[in-house]
Image: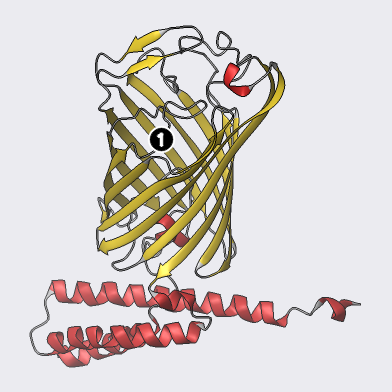
Amino acid sequence: MRSSSSSPLARRVLLAAALFGSLPAAGQALNGGAGLPHTRPAWVLENGQLTSQMGARFWGQASEQSYAPWGAPGKRNIWDLQSALALNYGLGAHLEAQITPVLYQSDQSGGGRFGHDLSATMAVGSLQWPSRSIFLGAAMTAHFPAGVSHNLLFESYSPARHAVTLTGLASYAADPEFPAEAISGHLNAGYTLFDDTGLQFHNQRTGARSFVVERSQKLTWSTGLALPGAHFDFGVEGYGQNWIRQPAAGAEGREDFAYASLSLRYKPLRWCHLSLAIDRRLSSDTDETIPTMAERGLGELPNYPSWLLQLGLHLKLLPLHFMQTSDEEVIMKRGEARTPVFEKIIGEESNKEAGRDDLDRLRAEKERAEKELERLRRVIETRQQEEKKPSPDQNL
């Protein structure tokens, strides 16, 4: 009875096993998954996967100023530019590591500087509870003051001290099997503790001095909606920070802020994506730093940029089969690797009495296989339609 009732199911599972891997598997995407610039998904990369993201963020504004480090008084184009690299590596079914060095920082205060702060993150995720569409996770980030300059204008608080951030992650995916390829919503809530007690801030122009008496603490938050497509992904986000205990009065970045962000990701290749994001500050420009921007000769400049433009290059580095140009080669290689696993499962089930858990496991594998087949069918149909499009000279 066992073999006769399970053989159709077994054949279907084995058929799908040969097609597994034609495209990224569940939860796999660039730099953590969701394709959003500011909000991390609650799922992690698969074991052995390595991705990178090179990003640059820019803001500029023409303003009257008499700030001594910037030269003679007058109207100038003020800017702030930062470039960073993020490397993400999947360590297991529920574990992911990330290292993010800031590569370049530039503004009028001291010109361009290569090398800045460094952060390292360990994330636990892909925990599906209380339903398969809801993903939960958490991340811990250690911040290291590796740069030469700190307490930077127009940037978040960056003391020359260590800090630790704990972040809770939650995501909802319309397709739990392939969450990064369907509509998904994300929520992050973080707490940062700075080891800045005793730090002194001194303004040479006004002579004002301030000291950190107790460790600074802040809450960070972000929420976003990802709308993936065949060649373009769209994202809508909101993010910000709120201080629990502000740093000393002379510190830059001691104000709260909130931003809205629209993002677009172009996917010309399976392993290479390009992204663009435009952020707009929603919060007021209340100046709580002493001395104020105006007192320092910075005129009407804001503490935080009123807008931000972000560009990103995203690469999938490992496994190497991501860079293969033929989908058929990817299908065959991953199918060959997975088929023995399914054969083992079915062989075990055929040698013993079927239980409820056994049937549920095979039923779940069957559902995943059917989704893989449907997903592959859509990809093939899309490719065939593109190949049938006439070339530009044929329309003349």
Q: Where is residue 241 in the image (x, y as percent from the top left)?
A: 41, 28
Q: Nearer the viewer, residue 181 or 2?
A: 181
Where is the C terminus found, in terms of image quarters?
A: bottom right
Residue at 36%, 57% in the rendered image: 88
Quarter of the view holding residue 295: top right
Q: Where is residue 169 in the image (x, y as percent from the top left)?
A: 32, 44
**Residue furthest left in the image:** 352
Q: Nearer the viewer, residue 241 or 164?
A: 164
Question: Can see residue 33?
Answer: no
Query: What is the image's colouring?
Result: secondary structure
Query: From the viewer's perspective, is residue 316 above or below residue 55?
Result: below
Query: From the viewer's perspective, is residue 135 above or below residue 4?
Result: above
Query: From the viewer's perspective, is residue 270 above or below residue 105?
Result: below
**Amino acid found under the numbered disc labelled 1:** Val
**Residue furthest right in the image:** 396
Quarter of the view holding residue 186: top left
Q: Would residue 306 be found to the left or right of residue 127 on screen? A: right
Residue at 44%, 19% in the rendered image: 255
At label 1, counting other C-alpha atoms closer than 10 Å, the crowd grade (few under 14, some 14-19, many 20 or more) is few
Residue at 14%, 85% in the rendered image: 349
User: Which residue is the site of mark 1?
Assistant: 148
Query: From the viewer's perspective, is residue 2 above or below residue 93?
Result: below
Q: Where is residue 189 in the image (x, y as percent from the top left)?
A: 34, 36
Q: How many marks?
A: 1
Q: Position of residue 296 (x, y in %)?
A: 55, 12
Q: What element carries label 1?
A: loop
Residue at 53%, 81% in the rendered image: 325
Q: Would residue 109 be found to the left or right of residue 316 on screen? A: right
Where is the N terminus found, in terms of image quarters?
A: bottom left
Q: Which of 218 and 23 is in front in this view?
A: 218
Q: Nearer the viewer, residue 306 or 153?
A: 153
Question: Can see residue 268?
Answer: yes
